[in-house]
Amino acid sequence: MVGEGGYKYQSQSGPVNHEQRFPTKQELKYKKKKKMMMIKLCFLAMALLCVGPANAQTQGVVFGYGGKNGPNQWAHLNPHFTKCAAGKLQSPIDIQRRQIFYNQRLESLHRDYHTTNATLVNHVCNVAMIFSEEAGDVMIENKNYTLVQMHWHTPSEHHLHGVRYAAELHMVHQAKDGSFAVVASLFKIGTEEPFLAQMKDKLVKLKEERSKGNQTAQVEVGKIDTRHIERKTRKYFRYIGSLTTPPCSENVSWTILGKARSMSMEQVELLRSPLDTSYKNNSRPCQPLNGRRVEMFHELANKYESGNKKKKTQLN
């Protein structure tokens, strides 16, 4: 009979096969080396899933938020994760008043999202919504970024003036050149958030799928109305940062909406419910600013500046 690796071995029920042979030391060494290589490739594949089309969240997560694979250890988990410790443009950050620079050249945030088909996914490290077709885009500094997915962190990753919020939504956009732009919304405990209210039953179903042992469950949402997300904002903060999960790739354009929105405590728990205990608090600690500028857009300030310019023109 032929066993694993193609080597013959003796059958208990049949006669001895005198042609059987055992693997040589070189063959055993090659087989061991091949096995180790496969293990390494599997590990790398799981890590790279973190930076697939959504470029941050994944199935088969190899990092965590505490203990031996927590944020302080990410850089040691894989050679591709070194930016998590060595990078100087890391996210999230605490946006402090003394670090903010008003930039009158910044324009109002223009987002154009569509009603589209979506799927809720348990990415092990968070709950995400993936879009199966074009979901719309955002224009940032004359560059177009297409919305590819959104996911939630509880509690918030970014802090605003030293305050950490109950949750944070990351809307991940990607340009044709592969660069990323994330638009983030902060949430405090209060009234129900309308967009999440549309998906209450789907989130419950995602939790049920997880309880059945399906760790990376998916639930079809169907057509989803994103108009509630596209709410106009009068104020936002912008800086250059990174992904907040390994491999912590840098030069990501971050836009943090200036006004915190409301979400019910029940909705926060629904977002946590499909996740294992170790991922229910899935927020990376704030990172050093390292001399970066945090720029602010404020619609009222822009109008004030424009008004002053008109007055000066009239006086001249």
Image (tube, rainbow, N blue to C red):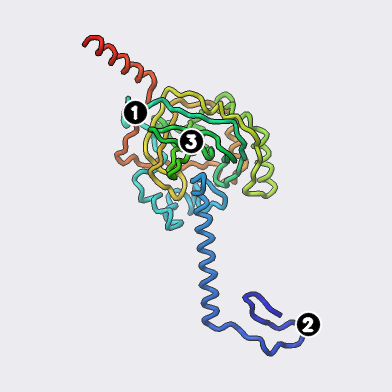
Residue type indicated by callout 2: Ser
Residue 104, x across and y down, in percent: 32, 25
In this view of the protein, can residue 266 be seen by the observer? Answer: no
Mark nearer the viewer, 1 or 2: 2
248 lies above or below 15: above
> At 48% from the left edge and 38% from the top edge, which residue is drawn?
173
Residue type, label 1:
Arg
What residue is shown with label 3?
Answer: 156
| Residue plotted at (66% across, 49% down) | 214
For the residue labelled by badge 2, is the local secondary structure a helix, a strand or a loop?
Answer: loop
Of badges 3 and 2, nearer the viewer stands 2
Query: In the figure, 24 relative to 190: above or below?
Result: below
Residue with the mark numbered 1: 97
Q: Specify the amino acid type for callout 3.
A: Ser
Please indicate whether residue 155 sits to the left or right of residue 290 in the image.
right
Q: What is the spatial separation of the Cα atoms under label 1 and label 2, in whole angstroms? A: 81 Å
- Which x, y percent locates residue 126? 55, 43
Q: Earlier in the sequence, mark 3 or mark 2?
A: 2
Left or right of 228? Residue 162 is left
Depth check: 229 or 154 in front?
Answer: 229
Q: Are marks 1 and 3 in contact (CB under 8 Å)?
A: no
Residue behind mark 2: 13
Residue at point 27%, 11% (across, down): 311
Hey, which residue is sitting farthest left in the picture? Answer: 316
Location of residue 268 (image quadrant): top right
Q: Residues within 10 Å of mark 3 (few under 14, many from 20)?
A: many
Quadrant housing the N terminus: bottom right
Residue lying at 51% horizontally and 42% vertically, measured from the top left = 282
Task: Give x and y (percent) for residue 42.
Answer: 54, 60
Q: Earlier in the sequence, mark 1 or mark 3?
A: 1
Q: CA distance from mark 3 to mark 2?
A: 64 Å
